[in-house]
Amino acid sequence: MTEPPAKELTVMLVDNEPARAAIVEQAMTDSGYRVIRRLENAKNLTEAVNQYQPDMVIIDIESPDRDMLENMSRLSQDNPRPIVMFAEEDDSRHVEAAIRAGVSAYVVDGVNSGSVKALLQVAIARFREFQALRSELESVKSQLEDRKLIDKAKGLIMKHQQCDEPAAYKALRKLAMDRSQRMTDVARNIISVMELMGDSK
């Protein structure tokens, strides 16, 4: 049975030099990628990505300035995509700043059509790995926050009903079941009510 053809990945290119951009675009096409939009700078990067929904962003510049790094950072927060940066500046501070802003691969040697495909595949794999780690971290943080809320609400129930921790937990769980709510939501409500009453310690 023949495998279905791989989906053609789309690219948004940021390059302020038309001649250089044409070379990069040709290298992308030769590697099986399709450039769907070219921007001269990263000023409206997030908006453009929201509008055109490329699979990845390629930035070809001499050196990333503060505005570009801020725009990349905003994109990585709001609508993350693999970002590959081809730059002439190999200063370690610029590389570190670019990686912090969300760049998956920072390439100093320029665009080499022979290695573009492998490079972009590595960038996509790195991006996916980072997103999975970030998602896992968010989940752990959320669980810790939930645990803190539940523990605080249990403490308040123990204080006001003069009961022990298992009884407070049982009361909290019963409230959640009766109201068809998550225990964290019930805990948050209890804490809010106690704050209004001036007793949330």
Image: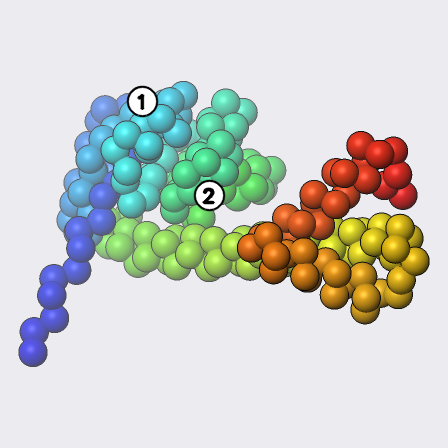
Amino acid, disc 1 = Glu
25 sits to left or right of 165 = left
Q: Nearer the viewer, residue 109 or 199?
A: 199
Amino acid, disc 2 = Val
Residue tagged 1? 40
**How many numbered badges does the structure rendering display?**
2
Q: Quadrant of residue 161?
A: bottom right
Q: Which mark is residue 103?
A: 2
44 sits to left or right of 193 = left
126 sits to left or right of 2 = right
Name the element at disc 1: loop
Please determine whether, in this image, residue 30 is positioned above or below residue 48: below
Mark 2 vs mark 1: which is more N-terminal? 1
Q: Residue at x 89, y 50 (%)?
A: 160
**Cα distance in 3D space between marks 2 and 1:** 18 Å
Q: Nearer the viewer, residue 75 or 57?
A: 75
Mark 2: few/some/many CA within 10 Å (<14, 14-19, 20+): many
Q: How is the image coloured?
A: rainbow
Where residue 59 sits in the image (x, y, percent)? 36, 35
Q: Residue at x 39, y 59 (%)?
A: 125
Where residue 28 sits in the image (x, y, percent)? 21, 45
Could you tell me if residue 69 is visible in this image? yes
**Quadrant for the N terminus in the image:** bottom left
Q: Which mark is residue 192?
A: none
Could you tell me if residue 119 is visible in this image? no
Where residue 24 sits in the image (x, y, percent)? 24, 38
Name the element at disc 2: loop
Where residue 86 sits in the image (x, y, percent)? 38, 39
